[in-house]
Amino acid sequence: MLTDELRNTLIQTAIEARKWAYAPYSNYAVGAALLTTSGRVYDGVNVENAAYPTGMCAERVAMYKAVSEGEQRFSAIAVVTSNGGTPCGACRQALSEFGLDVQVLIADEQGRLVQETSLRELLPGAFGPEDLPRK
Ligand SMILES: [Zn+2]
């Protein structure tokens, strides 16, 4: 379980990162902070693009940063938006690749914790690596 101090650290990190969101089309800035089991925190922001599908969510940016630095075990992620929006389906699926035991903190831009849940709750019946036959 996360301590209150760690919760606050993750939410504040996501709030700080959110300032760098590139969201000129939706104007919906998102900041994320992903805690690995090794104790490192990777932040991320949404990065939109004029060719809309090319954009990327904050949660996946944070996860890809972590994976690209050798981290594949996550314990929590904080997501901050103006109104406490939850991670999209694609981000839920992407995060689930490395396990469903991830606490998810949803906060608004004032840092208020709107919802605390888990990836397992957000993605019931997840399709994962174990569903693919291995040779
Ligand atoms: Zn997403």
Image (cartoon, rainbow, N blue to C red):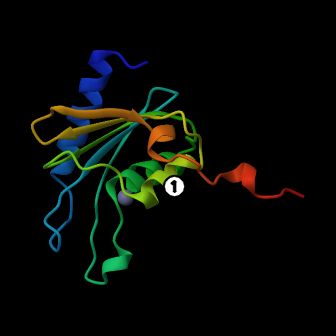
Image side of residue 25 versus residue 116, left or right: left
Write down which quadrant ligand 1 falls in.
bottom left
Tag 1: residue type?
Gln
Q: Residue 6 placed where, x, y %?
A: 32, 21
Q: Residues within 10 Å of mark 1 (few under 14, many from 20)?
A: some
Q: Residue at x 45, y 26 (%)?
A: 39
In the image, 25 versus 133, the foreground residue is 133
From this view, report whether residue 37 is shown above or below residue 58. Answer: above
Q: Residue furthest left?
A: 110
Drawn side of residue 6 relative to residue 28, left or right: right
Q: Which residue does the image show at 58% across and 50% down from the upper left? A: 126
Task: Tell me the quadrant of the picture where the C terminus can be found.
Answer: bottom right
Name the residue carrying label 1: 93
Residue at the spot 29% in from the left edge and 25% down from the top edge: 7
Which residue extends farthest bottom? Answer: 51
Residue at the extreme front of the image, as rendered: 125
Quarter of image, res 104: top left
- Residue depicted at 48% across the width and 45% down the height: 66
Quadrant, the N terminus: top left
Mark 1: which secondary structure?
helix
Spot occupied by residue 131 in the image (x, y as percentages of width and height)? 73, 54
Q: Is residue 90 above or below residue 130?
A: below
Residue 44 picture location, percent across and down: 32, 50
